[in-house]
Amino acid sequence: MTAQEKIEALRQELRQYNYEYYVLDKPQVDDYTFDQKLKELQEMEAKHPEFYDANSPTLRVGGEVTKNFATVKHEHRMYSLDNSYSQEDLEDWEKRIKKLVDGAVEYVCELKYDGASISLTYEEGVLVRAVTRGDGVQGDDVTNNVKTIRSVPLKLKGDFPAKFDIRGEIVLPLAGFAAMNAERVEAGDEPYSNPRNTASGSLKLQDSAEVAKRPLECLLYSIVGENLDIASQFESLEKARSWGFKVPEVAKKTASTAETFEFLNYWDEHRHDLPYETDGVVIKVNSFRQQEELGFTAKAPRWAMAYKFKTEQAETVLEKITYQV
Ligand code: NAD
């Protein structure tokens, strides 16, 4: 197989995995396999820039819109995140950032919740729309389903901007997921495979009354819009909480990768005490001015980086090895 054929084959394979994961909510391979193939494609594309394709899975947000809901264009694009796998990767990222921005850089570390990405639009403090990430440019209008989630405020309190979007994650807490599965088993149905795909699949149900029966929650962590009068990520979490949103309990400011690693190692060990599934940490440049200076690539912000928990990487490798035996 030539390099070009190999690149094309990997692109095809990854597109199919994306479709099964995001549209059907039924992944056919584990995340480790997906991540390894994506990495392999990234490396091959870096070696062969002559085979550049703007539609490559390395350059595009993985999801799609479905036919079951009205399609809505996001006023502000929704991005994915770049991934890092080691302290060295994070240190390289920190170095790149320091070259690109002026002044000292402060970071905010948050947990990476494993759910379905959502964007909520509020006008004059009222929820007007809820849209899935889709392909990042446009998503599915799932407003009626999201309105059934009790932690999503339909009306805000306090001093909020006239119009803004707030992004976050629709998650299925582990206890709720276990209860749903117990009911299914009792009824003789096959249990759901994991909370993430069940949360995502629930959002796409046609009957909102069915969605209302599911114990979904919505955690919000990112505000976007014009003239927001917010200077940093940390401040935006505090403001969102004061307006009535459920924001993640855990967020910490750090000044360096070394400090970030203390947060990371702590949560790597303690994440199973949390009510939700998390698969890593997201590190964000705190200052919105610096975020603006850094901007975005085609797929992800330059000012944020995901880091998958070591145990998550290890557990998946272990599973893989067990399969091979
Ligand atoms: P991602 O899930 O790695 O990261 C981006 C997303 O993280 C954001 O869109 C947001 O929804 C979410 N997120 C959670 N907590 C956040 C926080 N605190 N701040 C900001 N964002 C936060 O990227 P992706 O492109 O959605 O998906 C890639 C993931 O999906 C990988 O883990 C990959 O293995 C998996 N995947 C698996 C398959 C498969 O077939 N197994 C297919 C496609 C993707």
Image: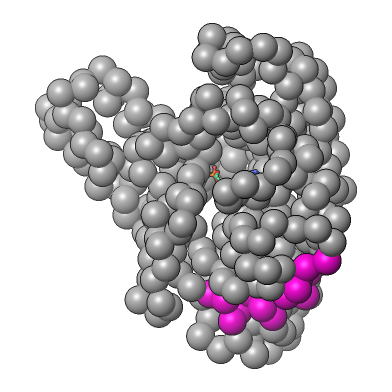
Q: Is residue 39 above or below residue 161?
A: above
Residue 83 falls left or right of residue 37:
right
Residue 181 falls left or right of residue 201:
right
Q: Is residue 76 above or below residue 265?
A: below
**Magenta-drawn segment:** 142-157
Question: What colour scheme does the image use?
Answer: one colour
Membership of 317 in magenta stretch: no
Residue 243 picture location, percent across and down: 81, 60
Q: Is residue 139 above or below residue 149?
A: above
Q: Nearer the viewer, residue 171 or 219?
A: 219
Q: Quarter of the image containing the N terminus? A: top left
Q: Residue at x 29, y 47 (%)?
A: 13
Q: Residue at x 79, y 23 (%)?
A: 254
Q: Is residue 192 visible?
A: no
Residue 323 falls left or right of residue 1:
right
Residue 224 picture location, percent across and down: 60, 49
Residue 225 picture location, percent across and down: 58, 51
